[in-house]
């Protein structure tokens, strides 16, 4: 197995240190589960709001999600930017903004945390900002969504049928175990993405 690309974690405006540390620790836990010989390096940019200025108009006020939730991020454009400009690493953009998930299915999803991933490139993970609306951040939910999105980034291109696996499409977080996030089949497939037996 070749060396694993570095993980680049970017925190948007409104993301706190504990949220970034949660994503960093979850990433390490994933590599513990898949039993890698050498951890990839982890780079952290706590002031990633500047990346939005580099990309251009990624904040949208139109579309279904904006009508329902307000400010959102054009996740597809941002992932394309990661693919073309930051392709020597896996990029995780942690934001308080809603991803551009323009469907009624996502209107009822767990929008405390949500995300989108591009295989081999990176993920955008929405995490509720500190004390938004008087409600504290759900770090367990952030861990579970990070496990889900990073599995896609690392090569799992499907959603699992097992509702207890974080790769399932189920938004029922009470079925998920943050300490053993993947079912046996998905863990095996994830190891195969890195050719680990």
Image (cartoon, rainbow, N blue to C red):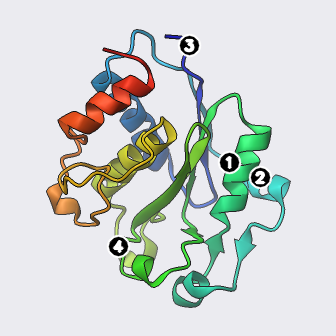
Nearer to us in this view, 38 or 159: 159
Q: Are marks 1 and 2 in contact (CB under 8 Å)?
A: yes
Query: Which class describes the residues within 10 Å of circle 4: few (<14), some (14-19), or many (20+)?
Result: few
User: Looking at the image, which is closer to me, 66 or 186?
Assistant: 186
Q: Is residue 125 visible?
A: no
The CA span between labels 3 and 4 is 41 Å
Nearest to N terminus: mark 2 or mark 3: 3
Q: Which residue is mark 3?
A: 3
Q: Residue 135, which numbered label?
A: 4
CB within 8 Å, label 4 to label 2: no
Spatial separation of the CA atoms under disc 1 and disc 4 = 23 Å
Residue carrying label 1: 47
Task: Give the CA distance from mark 4 to mark 2.
Answer: 27 Å
Quadrant (top left, top right, bottom left, bottom right) of the C terminus = top left
In the structure shown, which secondary structural element does the residue marked by tag 2 occupy? helix
Kindly identify which numbered label has been placed on residue 50: 2
Q: What percent of the width, then of the height, locates residue 112?
A: 39, 68
For the residues labelled 3 and 4, say whether their Cβ atoms are less than 8 Å apart.
no
Secondary structure at badge 3 equals: loop
Whichever of callouts 1 and 3 sits on the residue coming sooner in the sequence is 3
Position of 29 with respect to 98 (left or right) is left
Q: Nearer the viewer, mark 1 or mark 3?
A: 3
**Labels 2, 3: front one:** 3
The kind of secondary structure element at disc 4 is loop
Q: Position of residue 147 (x, y in %)?
A: 36, 44
């Amino acid at each position: 197995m070749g060396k694993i690309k570095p993980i680049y974690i970017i925190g948007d405006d409104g993301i706190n240190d504990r949220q970034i540390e949660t994503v960093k620790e979850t990433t390490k836990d994933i590599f513990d589960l898949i039993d890698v010989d050498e951890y990839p390096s982890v780079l952290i940019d706590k002031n990633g709001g500047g990346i939005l200025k580099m990309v251009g108009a990624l904040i949208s006020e139109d579309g279904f999600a904006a009508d329902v939730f307000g400010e959102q991020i054009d996740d597809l454009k941002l992932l394309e930017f990661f693919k073309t400009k930051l392709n020597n690493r896996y990029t995780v953009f942690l934001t308080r903004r809603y991803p551009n998930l323009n469907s009624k299915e996502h209107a009822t999803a767990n929008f405390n945390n949500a995300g989108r991933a591009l295989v081999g490139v990176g993920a955008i993970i929405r995490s509720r900002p500190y004390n938004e609306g008087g409600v504290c951040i759900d770090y367990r939910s952030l861990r579970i969504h990070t496990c889900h999105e990073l599995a896609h980034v690392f090569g799992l291109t499907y959603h699992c049928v097992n509702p207890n696996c974080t790769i399932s499409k189920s938004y029922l977080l009470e079925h998920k175990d943050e300490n053993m996030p993947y079912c046996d089949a998905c863990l095996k497939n994830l190891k195969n993405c890195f050719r680990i037996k």
